[in-house]
Amino acid sequence: MSSHGAAVVRPASREIARAAVQAELSLAAYDLAVEKGYDNVTLDDMAAAGGVSRSTFLRYFRTKDQAILVALKAYVERMADALRSRPREEDDWVALRSAIESFVVPIYTRNPAGAQAISRLAMFTRTLSGTHLERADWRTPLTAALAERHSIAGPVPIGLSVKVAAALDCMSLAVAHWVAVDGAADLVDLLREAFAALDGMRAAHD
């Protein structure tokens, strides 16, 4: 085929491909940080975990913190996919809790000590804590997924946004409590307890 007949890769396609590679590299870096300890891992180590050179890794991330942030966002995208897969007839709170559990259980229980260290880092490191507390980037994909469950194509009702924000706060508080007791409590139990408290408040209001 001549060069004139070759397919042109649109910028959007390149951006999608770049984002996919960035997500995979970040997840490999995150897993390594959980396994080895964030402070024990270098940019070279993260690059090697992703199967690329340091120079290639640096095209996607300027710092280790940035790699961790991108990984967390990638996990939230997967959480949103899990939410989309929940039965449509399921209550929103149950669906959100189940989707969050699908994120929490494999990550935080595979290597509890490493996960606690990463969580402490996210809570107390300035470059990570802003996003950790704000969670704006976390709410967007989950709110979109919840809207899809309700077949909403237009503006998302504020009620759905509030549900997502509350669900993420439940997760944040459960993880914070789990870290505070050095993993002595069961994280899934804490998460369910947090959601149950919200359910109780909602029932009392109704």
Image: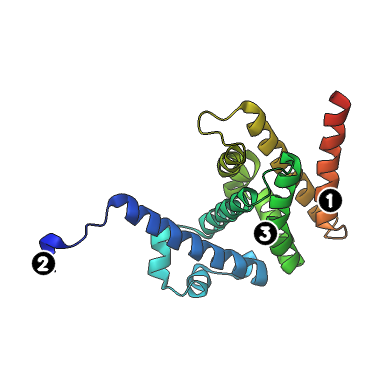
Residue at the location (60% across, 70% down)? 32
Task: Name the image quarter holding the N terminus.
Answer: bottom left
Identify residue for label 2: 2
Identify residue for label 1: 190
Identify residue for label 3: 118
Determine the CA span between mark 2 and mark 1.
62 Å
Q: Is residue 57 left or right of residue 156?
A: left
Residue 184 in sight here:
yes
Q: Nearer the viewer, residue 145 or 74?
A: 145
Q: Is residue 19 left or right of residue 40?
A: left
Residue at the location (76% across, 45% down)? 94
Q: Earlier in the sequence, mark 2 or mark 1?
A: 2
Residue at the location (81% across, 56% down)? 187
Q: Is residue 132 above or below residue 29?
A: above
Q: Quadrant of residue 135?
A: top right
Q: Nearer the viewer, residue 202 or 15?
A: 202
Going by the numbered disc 1, the residue's amino acid type is Leu
- In percent of width and height, residue 88 lies at 67, 44
Q: Earlier in the sequence, mark 1 or mark 3?
A: 3
Say what secondary structure mark 2 lies in: loop
Say what secondary structure mark 1 lies in: helix
Using the image, tell me which numbered label, if any, was put on residue 5: none
- In percent of width and height, residue 57 lies at 43, 66
- In percent of width and height, residue 56 lies at 38, 67
Seen from this angle, which residue lies furthest top? 205
Say what secondary structure mark 3 lies in: helix
Going by the numbered disc 3, the residue's amino acid type is Ile
